[in-house]
Image: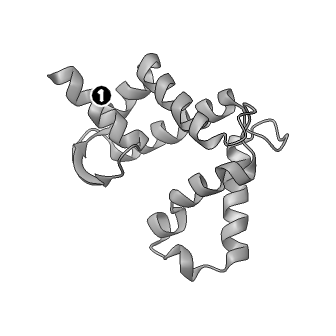
Amino acid sequence: MSVEILDGDTIRRFVADEAAFGASIEARFAGLDTDNDGLLSFEEMENELSSLRVVEVHFGVDDEAVRPDELARLHRGLFARFDRDGDGRVDMEEFREEMREVLLAVAAGLGFLPVQMVVEDGSFLKLAVEREKTLQA
């Protein structure tokens, strides 16, 4: 983890850069696709969904304080957002489009003023910051 300064434009430029964004999506998808079938099951995405810490981040509640059935229901709902055609699996395009929407929503939430935040190594936000630093160098 590291502390970085970013704003909504940093994220929007990252998403608009098809080469950088596409490569990061493909790498994350490949890392999640443990059976290498080109599709993500709920089980393959479960750790990724847990890492989002939606309850902790958005509601200030530690995930461990939430009943397991409630957390599972939340994760199933998040998975359904990715599984746009409802077939129980997420393909590369579904993953790409949902991640695009998520990142653009984060960008909208940040607005235009730079903020300092802790980002995880390898996260899409960290990749956006690294891309920006490379372009400025």
Q: Hey, which quadrant is residue 13 in on the image?
A: top left
Color scheme of the displayed model: one colour
Q: Hey, which quadrant is residue 113 in on the image?
A: top left
Query: With 11 as the anchor, is 41 left or right in this view?
Result: right
- Secondary element at image label 1: helix
Compared with residue 41, is residue 54 higher up or lower down, i.e. above or below? below
Tell me how many marks there are.
1
- Along the viewing direction, whichever of 100 and 26 lies nearer the viewer: 26
- Along the viewing direction, whichever of 72 and 116 lies nearer the viewer: 72
* Residue at 36% across, 36% down: 127
Q: Hey, which quadrant is residue 81 in on the image?
A: top right
Residue 107 in sight in this render: no
Compared with residue 91, is residue 22 higher up or lower down, i.e. above or below? above
Which quadrant of the rendered structure holds the N terminus? Answer: bottom left
Q: Amino acid at mark 1?
A: Arg
* Residue at the extreme left of the image, as rendered: 137
Badge 1 density bin: few <14, some 14–19, many ≥20, Cα 10 Å? some
Query: With 73 as the anchor, is 97 left or right in this view?
Result: left
Compared with residue 120, is residue 64 higher up or lower down, i.e. above or below? below
- Along the viewing direction, whichever of 31 and 70 lies nearer the viewer: 31
Percent of width and height locating residue 137: 14, 22
Residue 82 in sight in this render: yes
Percent of width and height locating residue 40: 71, 41
* Residue at 25% across, 28% down: 132
* Residue at the extreme front of the image, as rendered: 35
Q: Which residue is mark 1?
A: 131
* Residue at 60% across, 57% down: 47
Percent of width and height locating residue 8: 33, 37
Query: With 65 as the anchor, is 81 left or right in this view?
Result: right
* Residue at 21% across, 30% down: 133
Percent of width and height locating residue 74: 67, 63
